[in-house]
Image: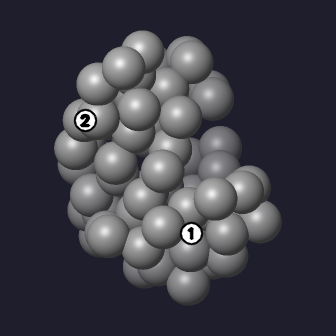
Amino acid sequence: MTRGGPAAQGGIRKGDLIVAMNGAEITNVDLLQKFLTDWPISKPVNVSVLRVQERLEIDVTPAEAGARE
């Protein structure tokens, strides 16, 4: 995760385990990359994460790699 990147800005923390994107189950990094490849840049997506023993729903807005606001 990039410090200051879209995930961090959305509230995802180091150690969080992504388990779903907009309700689609994410079981490995390949599925995560495929989802993000198909998802429109700048359109918010709901990310389900496990943090310690709690499941959280976090909205994140993807951005191009290396893009700065």
Q: Is residue 66 left or right of residue 50?
A: right
Q: Which circle marks residue 56 in the picture?
A: 2
The residue drawn where x is 49% and y is 26% is: 16
Q: How is the image coloured?
A: one colour
Three-letter amino acid code at the position of disc 2: Leu
Q: CA distance from mark 1 to mark 2?
A: 19 Å
Q: Residues within 10 Å of mark 1 (few under 14, many from 20)?
A: some
Q: Which circle marks residue 61 in the picture?
A: none
In the image, 60 versus 42, the foreground residue is: 60
The residue drawn where x is 24% and y is 42% is: 58
- Of marks 1 and 2, the one in the foreground: 2
* Residue marked by disc 1: 36
Q: How many marks?
A: 2
Q: Nearer the N terminus, badge 1 or badge 2?
A: 1
The residue drawn where x is 32% and y is 70% is: 23
Tell me where residue 64 sits by quadrant: bottom right
